[in-house]
Amino acid sequence: MSMKTTVLAGFHYMRQCAHYAIAPRNSYLHTSAFLAKAEDRKEMLASLPAKDEGTIGEKSVDIDTLITRKEKFFPDASTATQLFNGIPFNELPICNIRVSPNNTIISVTDYKGVPRLIRSCGIEGFKNTRKGTNIAAQATAVSISAKAVELGWKTVRVKVRGLGPGRMSAIKGLQVGGLNIVSITDNTPVSWNPPRPRKQRSL
Amino acid sequence: MRHAQFLARTVFVHNNNVEEACRLLNRILGKEEIFDQFRRTRFYEKPFQVRRRVNFEKCKAIYNEDMNRKIQFVLRKNRVEPFPGCS
């Protein structure tokens, strides 16, 4: 953009000078001004750092090392009765993490899904835009995991839903807080024939 | 998309290595275009935008196919053991 505008501005200036010499001053119509604005915004958006959505590794093209690994990474039919810390997998308490761009809500439920604890970045004392940061999510996760450990729930399975800066850091925070995470499940609601979503934001 | 809870889209954590498990899960969901679809359906995509996107994807697929063929052609080997000392 910058190159173009300087050239255009120079051109206008030269024309103006020429006019002064021969005729009284006219008013000039600049039609390229709004174009410059749009291009400015594009440039600005391109220069911004990529938004953190907690999806580290989404774009990575790793050579699949899973084949050579001996550990089991994916559940199968026998997983439900497999013991973790003396508890079968399907009776482990569940930690639900609801992530959105503006907030992170973490709740701990027993294996039936009855909620026992719930914390969000807002409850934790982060307000407004600070709610939607990875630091807020981590702090919330640490505090809720301390409460869960008090209840005697040390081993949990994690269910994540949605995309946002808190997605990765909340899981990390749970571990920092002293919980033993057995598995991570993605529970993001995705539909290929959804009802009509809201209209696009005008940027 | 309904699926069996804790059977689909689930990854185990080994040696408390949460980040590795997360990355694996994200990579799979990214490759399966589940995240893409999620992002696309946050806001309504107008028909002209759908057409533009689909056309762009078509062109990209054609380009990638041709480019892969070219790369395979350049990298082709005509010997009994294609990469000696690498097996």
Image: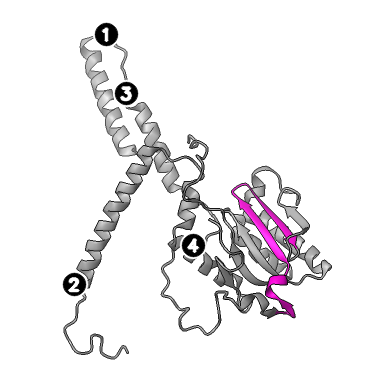
Disc 4, SS: helix
Image location (x, y in percent) of residue A103: 65, 49
Which mark is nearer the camera, 2 or 3?
2
Disc 1, SS: loop
Q: Name the residue under label 2.
A: B73
Mark 4 neighbour class, 10 Å CA radius: few under 14, some 14 to 19, many 20 or more: some
Do the residues at pointers 2 and 3 share their chain?
Answer: no
Residue at x 27%, y 8% (from the top left corner): A24
Residue A10's quadrant in the figure?
top left
Q: Distance between the residues labelled 2 and 4?
A: 32 Å
User: Amino acid type of disc 3?
Assistant: Thr
Q: Distance between the residues labelled 2 and 3?
A: 51 Å
Magenta-drawn segment: A84-109
Q: Residue B29 carries which label?
A: 4
Which mark is nearer the camera, 2 or 4?
4
Q: How far apart are marks 1 and 4 (CA)?
A: 67 Å
Image location (x, y in percent) of residue A89: 68, 74
Q: Residue A24 carries which label?
A: 1
Residue A117's quadrant in the figure?
bottom right
Q: Is residue B77 magenta?
A: no
Q: Can residue A15 be seen here?
A: yes
Q: Name the residue under label 3.
A: A31
Do the residues at pointers 1 and 4 share their chain?
Answer: no
